[in-house]
Image: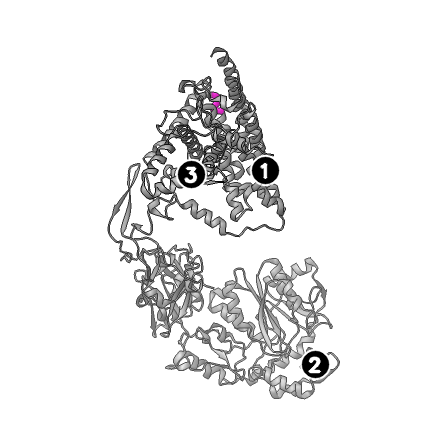
Amino acid sequence: MIDISGLIGTIMNNPVNIPLLYVIYDLLLKIPVLGGIVAFLLDFTILGMPIVKYIIGFVLWKPFFTLIIIPGFATLGTMLLVLPWLERKLVGRMQWRVGPREIEPHTRGSIQLLADTLRFLFQEVIIHKDAHKHYFLQFPFLYFIPVLLPLLFINAGAAGHPLVPIQTDYALQIMIGLVSLMPVFIIGVAWAANNRFSFIGAVREAFMYFAYEIPFIIAVLAMIVLYGTSNTAEVISGVNQSTWLHWGVILNPLAALTFFIATAMATSRLPFDIPEADQEVAFGPFVEYTGIVFGLAYIMAYEKAYVLAAIMTMLFFGGGSGPVIPYLGELSYGIWFVVKTLIILLVLVNLRGVYPRYRIDQALGIGWSAMLTFALVALVWSIVIGVII
Amino acid sequence: MKKVGTPEYDLSDKLKYHVSALSTAAKEMALPLNITTHYPRERKRQPACFRGYMLFDPERCISCFQCSFVCPANAIWMKDAPSGRYYPTVDYGKCIFCHFCIDSCPGGALRTTKIHDVAYKTMDEMFTSTEEMIEPPEIIREDEGVVDYVIDKEDLSLKRTKEIDELIVDVEPSQGVPMISVCVDRGSCLACKVCDKICESGAVSSVVEEATMTVKMGIDAEKCTGCGLCVKECSMQILRLVRK
Amino acid sequence: MMKMAAETKVGEAEWEVKIPEKKLKDRLFFENLKAMVIDTQMCSRCLTCVSICPSKLIVNEEDIVDFPDYDKKCLDCGACVRVCPRYDYKPKSGLGDYIEFTAGQSKRFKGQDGAMATEFIFSAIDMGLIDRGLFVDRDEQWRTSVFHVRGQEQLEKLPLGGTKYVFADVLPELKKAVMFSKVGVGVVGTPCMVSGVRKLQEEFPVFKEKVKLVVGLFCTENFHYNEVSKYLIEKGVDYSKLIKTDIMKGKFVATMTDDEVKFKVSQLSSILPSGCNVCTDFTAVESDVSVGSVGSVAGFSTTVVRTEVAKEIWDYIKKMGNAEVGEGKVEELDFLINHKKEREKNIKQ
C-alpha cells in the first residue's frame, strides 16, 4: 500500500522557496472578488485533503520544479522559441541586413517562429519509398532521450541552494555519457533517409564526433579533478565556486576554451557546420525531412546546444550565482542561470556571422592537435591548481 | 610560375585578428549599419538608364528585324500588322533584360523604363503583344519613399527621402555600335535596285545612265543607320554590315 | 541566310554595274527576254533566268517560263537577259575540247549506266573541293525535285540516279546552294543548263567562285512532265511499277517490275519541246566533264574529261579505286553529234 500521507509529506516539505508567491497571495486576497475565489480554492478540500494546495505544492516541489520549469523543459522550450529568432536577428545585424521582419514589423519579427511552426505542422510529411519508414520517423523522437535525460542533473542553483532534480555523485559522468550518445542518433537519422547527401552528412558528422569527443571529455575531467567532485550540487557549492574569482573560467581558462570549441563542434555551429553545410551537402543528414519531423530535426541541434551550454554554465560560470534579486528567493538563482546560459548560447550561435567554415580535415586537425593539447595542459594545470588551492 | 599558399601568420597576429573579428561583430550587433531597402514601402532610386520593362513606339519602327536578330534569348517575335509592317512582340518569360534590342534599334522605337516589378498570373500573359507594349503596364505603387545609396570613399550609407520616384523617363536612345552597309562583291551586283527601294533613310542611291549603259550605285555612310534592311533584301547577298 | 554580323572585310560604298543593251528599247528587260527567247520558241527551259531574277520569274502550269504582272513587278535590272544562253544565241556543237576520253563504272553507286556523274560529285566532296552537290530526285509519280547532298549517307534512302527524261528545276536550287555554301557547289545538268551556268559565271563573280564542278550529260532532248507522262500512260506504262527509263539505239525503253514498254524514239517527236529543237549541243561542250551512255559498253558511262579540275577528280577516283576504268569509243558519238548539229537550221534569225 502506498503511503500517501508520507508521499505528500515529502512533497510538501521540499519546496522551492519563492517569497514572491506569498506577496502575490497576500495581494490577491485583498482584491474583493478575486480574493474570495482564491481563498475558496485554497481551502477547497475533497476527502479531507486540500487538493489545490497540494497541487501548488507539487508544482513547487523541488525536483518537479527544476525538471519542468527551471532549468528543465519550460526553459528548454523557451530557449527553442527565442534562440533562433535572436540568432537570425543578430546575425542579420552583423551582416548589415535585417533579420525576419515581414511577419509582423511591429513585433520585429519575433513571431516568425510561430509562423514557421505552423508551417511545419501543416506541411505534409513525405517519406520516400527508399527510406526505412520506421526509423525515419522514430529517430528524431528517440533523439529526445539523450537530450532530455541530462536535464535531470543540471543544477541551476548557487552555493548552498542546489536547484537540481536528482543529486548524485555520478551526475557529470552520466551527462557526458549521454552527450556522447547523441551523434549516434544523428547518424541513425541519416542512415534511415537513404540518400547520398545524408550519407555524406553522416560520415562528416562521424568525423566531427571523432574530432571533438576526446578534448571534450578531457576538459570536463580537468574540471572534475579541480572541483574534486562530479556531483552537480557540489560543483557549485560553498566550497567550489563560492565567489566569482573562483569561477571555473578564471581558474582554468584553457579548459573553458576547449569546452566552448568542443560545443561549437558538437552542435554543428559555424564555423564547424560541416555535416550540414548548405552549399555542400544540402543540409546533410536531415535533407529528406519535411513537415513536423523537419521541425524536430531542426531543433535537435538547439536542444543539444542548450544542454551543453547549461553544463558550461555550471562548470565554468558559477551556475546560478549572482546578486540576489529580492523577493524571488531561490528563483533568482534560476533566473541568473537562465541569463548566463542565454548569453553563452548567444555567443555560440552568433559565431556564424564571424567565422567562415572549416574544412573537415582542418577541423580534425585542430581537434587532435590544438584542442587536445589545450585539454591536456588544462588537466595538468587543474591538478597543479587543485594542489595549490 | 608563382606558388601561392596561405599567408603565414604568427600567434600574435592570429590572436589580433581573432580579437578584431569578434569585436567588429560585437560592435555591429550593437550599432548596426543597415543597408536593406524595405521594398515595397520604399524603392531604391535607379539611374535613368536602368534596364527595365521596355516600351515601344510604332511610329519610329522601320521593321528592320534587328531587335529580333540580336536578341540573345530569342524573346522577340515579329508579328505582322495590317499596314504590312512587322512589329516586335516580347516574351517576358524569356527576356533577360539585356536591352541589346534597344541598343540596336536604328530608329529608337524601343525605349527603357525604370519599371522592374510587373507581375503576371499565367505564363501565357508574359507574351506581351505590340499593343500592350505601347503603354506602360499596370503596377501597384506602394512605396512612399526613395532610398539613395551614398558612397563616400569607403563609407556606405543610406539616405531616405520622402518622394515618389518617376518610373517613365526620357532617355537618349543609345548609339549602340554604329554600323554601315557596304557592298563586298561589286561584280556580282545585278543592279536590281531593291536595296534602294527598301532603304528607309535614303542612304542607298541608284542612278541609271542611259548614255553609258551603266547603273551607278552608292551607299552614303552619313545617312546609313545600319538597320540592315538592304543586307537582308539583296538578292545576291553581297551587302554586309561593318563598323563605321 | 541573314549575314548580319559585322565582318572585318572592307567593302565598297560606290560601284557601277554595266547593264546590257536592250533589243527593244522603251520596253522592260523581261519583255525583251520574252520577245527574243520565249515567244520565238527558243527557250530551252534551263531556268537560268528564274534562278537569277530578284522578283521571282516563275515557271507556269504549262511548264513555260513566265512572269505574271511584269509591267508592275519587273525591276528592269537586266539580269535575266545577261544570263540567258539563248538571248544572243551562239550555238555550240561537236565533241568539244577534252583532255581524256574514257569510260568508267562506279563501284560505290548505282545509276543509269555507270553512275559516273554521281561518282564525280561525291569524289569532289571527298576531296574537299565542294561541300554540296545538286541531285534530281523523283517521287512515285516520277515528278522531279532537286535537293542538296552533302554526304554519301543521303543516297542510301533515295532512288537518285537514273535519268528521268523530264525537266527539273536545278538552277534555281543552284543559286540557293551558292548562297549557303562556304566551300563550293557541284552541279549535274543538261547542256542547256551547263551553258546557263557558264553565263552566270561570266557575268557574276560569286558563281565563278562558288560553282566549282559542272558535270554535263549527253542529251538529245528532254520532255515536259505533263506531256510525256500522258504519252507513256497511253502506251501502257504503269508509273507505280516503273523502275527505269532509257533511250537506247533509237528506242525508248520503260522498264517496269513485271513488264517492259518499247517504242521508237522518233514517235515522241510530237511532244518534242521547241527549245530542244534548236539545241545543237549533244555532249555539253562547256562542262568540266561530260558523262553519257553512248560510246561505251552497257554498264559503263562514257566520261569526257575536259578541264584540269575534272582531271584532278578523275585521278583521285582512279587512285582510290572507286571506279572500274573502261574504254570509250569516240566514233560511236558521231551519229548523234551530227543529228543534233542539223538542228541548227531550225534556228530563226
- Give the amino acid at mark 3: Asp
Q: Which residues are magenta?
A: A254-258
Q: In this rendering, is residue A192 above or below B115?
A: above
To which residue does mark 2 refer?
C254
Most distant residue in the top direction: A388
To which quarter of the image does residue B153 belong?
top left
| Quarter of the image where one finds residue A253 | top left
| Three-letter amino acid code of the residue under disc 1 | Phe
**Residue lying at 69% horizontally and 84% vertically, measured from the top left:** C237
Can residue B28 be seen in the rendering of this structure?
no
Q: In the image, residue C267 lies at what x, y percent? A: 66, 88
Looking at this rendering, what residue extends furthest in the right direction?
A: C258
Q: Secondary structure at mark 1?
A: helix
Question: In whole angstroms, how far apart are the C-alphas of marks 3 and 2?
Answer: 125 Å
Position of A370 relative to B46 (above/below): above
How many C-alpha atoms fall within 10 Å of the one at disc 3: few (<14), some, or many (≥20)?
some
Q: Position of residue A64 (x, y in %)?
A: 49, 33
A233 or C52: nearer the viewer: A233
User: Comparing marks 3 and 2, which lies closer to the viewer?
Assistant: 3
Identify the subunit bearing mark 3: A
Residue at x-position 35% and y-position 74%: B83
Q: State the separation of the CA atoms marked 3 and 1.
A: 49 Å
- Residue of label 3: A43
Q: Is residue C333 visible?
A: yes
Callout 2: 10 Å neighbours few (<14), some, many (20+)? many
Q: Which residue is mark 1?
A: A185
Is residue C154 in the magenta section? Answer: no
